[in-house]
Image (spheres, rainbow, N blue to C red):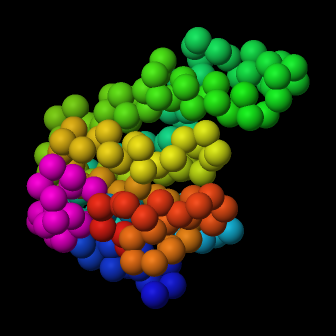
Amino acid sequence: MKPWIERLRDLEEVLALSDPRPAISAYHDMPYAIFHYDPEEEFLFRKELDLLSTRLRNKGKRVTRVSLAHLLDQAMQSPVSWTDLIEGEKSVGLPEAIETVSEILASHRPLPDLVGAAMPEDADPLQDVVFLWRTGALFPCYRTFALLEQMKGKVIAPTILCYPGTLDGPAGLKFLGVLEADHNYRPKIF
């Protein structure tokens, strides 16, 4: 596999196409793909994502970046605040705190709903490109596989999930290189 910086250039060529959807996904109701990179390269990746966003804008694309860290923080504004969670962890332990955050993102403030609300309202699949980034903030509370599956049929614009992790086989990804690999990703992995 090519180094991530070269794969990012390949992805740029695809996203610059007049209609990148067929090149990022074989599924008409899943116009998204995953771009994986070494978690240790997070800050360099962020810099390169800034540059890529600028280059795509210069080519006439409208780029939206959705921070999953920001959406996690939004979700934690209710029913449980970060302060409540930290205090609760002291008394019930880390596994229960992780389960609380997982439950909030799955049921109380569903992450797919928050992502959907952050998407461009008037999305044009020929002009818009969306990057879901700061994905590592979800560790270890939420697996991105669940997010992608629940977004099926709801995404219009070409969307790239920026994934800090390692490839495990042709379609397996290990979140942050730590968790057991999910091998059932249907989106294309760059």
Q: What is the chief secondary structure element of the magenta stretch?
A: loop
Q: Which residue lies furthest to the right in this view?
A: 90
- Residue at 22% of width from left, 32% of height from top? 121
Residue 156 visible in the snapshot: yes
Residue numbers of the magenta segment: 15-32
Quadrant in which residue 137 is drawn: top right
Looking at the image, which residue sits at the far top? 79
Q: Is residue 148 left or right of residue 22?
A: right
**Rendered image quadrant of residue 8:** bottom left
User: Is 79 rendered above or below residue 101?
Assistant: above
> Outermost residue, bottom direction?
2
Residue 26 painted magenta: yes
Asked whether the viewer can see residue 42, the reply is no
160 is higher (above) or lower (below) than 104: below
- Whether the magenta-drawn stretch holds residue 31 is answered as yes
Q: Which residue is drawn at 12% across and 55% down?
A: 28
The residue closer to the viewer here, 164 or 98, is 98
Report whether 178 appears left or right of 129: right
Instruction: Give the percent coordinates (x, y) of residue 62.
Output: 26, 51
Q: Which residue is drawn at 30% across and 61% down?
A: 187
Question: Where residue 40 sits: x, y (%)?
Answer: 68, 68
Q: Is residue 98 above or below residue 88?
A: below
x, y percentage for residue 59?
24, 65
State the image coordinates of residue 150 (x, y, percent, origin top left): 32, 39
Q: Residue at x 55, y 49 (%)?
A: 134
* Left or right: 146, with 88 as reference point: left
